[in-house]
Each structure stands twice: as C-alpha cells, then as structure tokens.
Amino acid sequence: MKFVDEFRSPRLISRTGEEIRRLADPNRHYRIMEVCGGHTHAIYRFGLKDLLPSNVELIHGPGCPVCVLPMGRIDDGLSLAAEPNFIFAAFGDMMRVPGTHGSPLEYKARGMDVRIVYSPTDALKLARSNPEKHVMFFAIGFETTAPSTALTLVRAKAEGLRNFSVFCNHVTIIPAIRAILDSPDMRLDGFVGPGHVSTVIGCRPYDWIAKDEGKPVVVSGFEPLDILQSIVMLLRQLRKGEAKVENQYKRVVPWEGNRAALRAMAEVFELRPYFEWRGLGFISQSALKIRASYAAWDSEQRFSVPGVRVTDPKAAQCGEVLKGVLKPAQCKLFGRECTPEQPVGALMVSSEGSCAAYFNYEHRKPIAIAAAAN
Amino acid sequence: MCLAIPGKVIELDSQNALQAIVDVVGVRRKVDLGLLQDAPPVPGDWVLIHVGFAMSKISEADAADQMRTLTMLGEAEAAMQEVRGYGLENKQNEQQDQSVPRLKQ
C-alpha cells in the first residue's frame, strides 16, 4: 500500500478499491487475465494486488513478446550473425535474452557485430551507411511494433536497399488468447485487454471473446486507476451476467484502431500457418511472415536458416507460469537458478515478464522490509 | 520496445512530410509520422511514440499522465535512453538531463 501516495487521485483509487470489494461476490472466485506485459509490470510495481479482495485473482497473460519467443528463433537469428560482413540489429530488450550458446550481448563480446537499435528505421540507416555489409533487423513484438517494421520494409523496397533484411518474429495477440481459452486447465472469467496493441487493432477483434466465449473484455490504460477501473468494469459485467467489449482507455485507443498501421501490416505481412510460442507450444495463424513480394528483404527467404527447435530446460516451468497454472514463485528454479541477473527462463528476462516483475516487487519486498527493520 | 513515449511535435521536416522533430522532455529527435498519415499531426500536437514511430495523437494532459506513469513504473530513464537512441546520433539541441523527467509546457 505504500505506493498509493504517489498515485494521482489516491482517494479515487481507494474508492475504486472499495467498489471492487462491493462488486465482488464473496461466494465466487474471479480469475481475470491481464493480457499485456505492461499491465503485469504495473500491477506488481504499484502493488495493486494489495487493493484487491482475495477472491479477485489476476492471472498474467502471454503479452510479453520477449518472453514468448522460443529459444530456437534466437539461435536461428544468431546463427546468421556469425556470417562474415553481417550486422545483427535488435531492440535493447533482446540483448540479454539467452540463446543456446549465449545472448546477443555475449555474441557481441565474442566479436560479432551486434547492434542495439531503438527503431527499425535505425537498422535501415545502418544498412545505408554500411553498404559493404548486410544488416539484419531481428524484429519482435505484437501489433504495437509490427506496423513500424512493416513501414520500414516498404521504405527499404522503395529505396531498393539490397543489404537489409528483417528476421520476422512478430506475433499477434488474438490467437494466443484463443489458445489460452482452449486450454483445458484454464478457467478465466474475463480479460483486461492490452492498451497499446489495441491502439493499432482497435476493439473489434475482441468481439468473439464476448460473443462466443461469453467472457467480458475491458481494454485498459496503464495507470493504477486505469487498471482498477477496468477491473470494476469487468466485475459490473460479471455481476449482471453480461459479456461485452468495453474501452476504458478511450483517451488513447480508438474503437477502429489505427487504419494506416493496419494497411502497412497488410501490405507487408501475411499470417504464418503456425508459430511456436514459448510455454504455449504451436499456435495456428498466430504470427506474421513477410509476403513473397518482399522476399528480397526477408532474412528467412533470403538466407538459409537452420530452423532450430530448442526445448526449454526441463526444470523451468515457464509454460505453466505463462498459462497462469503456476505462480512465478512456485517454479522450482524461481529466485535460485533463475533470477533477473541470470535468467534461465524467458519470463525472467524482461521487466514485463511475470517472473521478473514478481521477483523485483514481491519476492524482494520482504527482504527490503527485513533490511529496514534491522 | 513496449514503452509508449509521449512527445510534442515541434516542426515537420520540410524535405520529408512523414517526419517531424518531436520533443520528449527536452530531448529532440526525428520521429516517423508514417503511421499517422491518415490524420497527420501538426506542430504543437502531442503524440505517443513506439520504436521511433508516432502511433497516436493524444492530449497534452494525457501526455503528462503517460510520462508520470513511465516515471512511476521506473521506466522513464529507459524511455529517455530510447529517445536519445533514435537516429543513432546525438543532437546538439538537447537540454540538461533531469533526474526526474517532467513534461515541459
């Protein structure tokens, strides 16, 4: 609760907490999934769980792109980085993610040309300024980053820039939600919908969750009050026996999404028949591949990629945590072999991964309190 | 990568209509407007930036909220590092760093 003072309108927050207690039926246990890793981070950081009654449980969803990327894809991308005159460019988030033979950062330490870029267009710039080298942009992310990669490829093609390609790992959120709902060991009552992904895709793609699955969805912002209000909106629907899609984050998310971004994606990408998700396995039509018309800028169509499949270390239970079956601390490796400093599983790598968030804000909390007490 | 960073459009690029100089807490960088081409922002507008691309137009109050959220999440520094990284170069027109970033008027 100590964070509450820092929030905007703390009084409104405690009132929203009270409203949640009032709406939650004490005879019922609610399992609400926040799909987006940004929400997971915010929930732990702000200690929002402390404001919820014990029968309102938050389950952390698959919305952390670094966390769901199978290790084989990292190995594949890094295998190309070993080619002569090759530059491997990726967002900073990727740099510490372990592959079988090390992370991109460790490959860099071994002398490979690995660069951090903050925008895909910067990878394009690298290609322009290094005409004797090939620049491969290792693209990851949901619909929040996929349109930027798409537009970058449109530009590369328009320019006829031949020494640039994209190793595409973009995934789409809807099939992952479907896979989770289809999973037999999963029982959910509703969803806190992702904020920034919805800026791009809008709110319509969630309609089936309400109509066919009978579960409410509330697209939410990232402030503590946003998330709590979204939970209130979900509980109100559940109380009335309703299931519809609502938009709590209207100030940023248009119902129709961003059409220019969707056009750019449609121009460059098509759906892969299936794609492997770490922890969730193969999910059909859940990822984007580069269309044949852009084959010359697709690393996978242009180079020979080994197509490595790596199973996660057996002791790591990322899959169960990712599906919400286990809590982070219930994994055998949590906090011992697997920490944010030395991650074994991907959920520990990113600050949006539920294990790292849990480790940083829950696991360390008692330690901090103990230290303060001494 | 997943951070949405608020910034104010300062001026459009005269050479390229799909680029603008955007100010994020005093750091000015080129930001791509290609994903807002259906309703391009004008100088003075506030936008949310993802990986160097303006993704949506927002109000000034929402921009301030978003920067405060980033600060509270402990991500403000990472956001500024990202913004400084755009364009792979450091620009001259950069103000002094502030330990706690706040939005300017």
Image: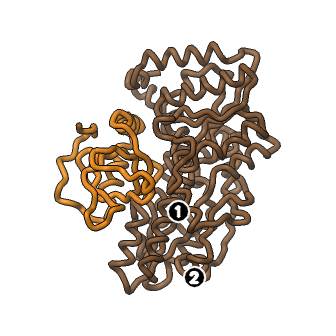
Position of residue A140 in the picture relative to residue B94 (left or right) = right
Image point (38%, 35%), residue name = B62
Residue B20 location (% of width, % of height): 30, 57
Q: In the depicted view, which residue is nearer to us: B73 or A205?
A: A205
Residue A130 location (% of width, % of height): 35, 81
Position of residue A252 in the picture relative to residue A192 (left or right) = left
Residue position marked by numbered label 1 in the rendering? A264
Q: In the depicted view, which residue is nearer to us: B80 or A148?
A: A148
Give the secondary structure at mark 1. Answer: helix
N-term mark: 2 or 1: 1
**For residue A233, above or below residue B84:** above
Q: Residue placed farthest to the right in the image?
A: A184
Image point (51%, 67%), residue name = A138
> What color does chain A have in the rendering?
brown
Which quadrant would the C terminus of chain A be assigned to in this image? top left
Residue position marked by numbered label 2 in the rendering? A302
Chain that the image shows in orange:
B
Residue B104's tag is: none
**For residue A55, above or below residue A165:** above
> Which quarter of the picture shows residue A7?
top left
Image point (70%, 44%), residue name = A323
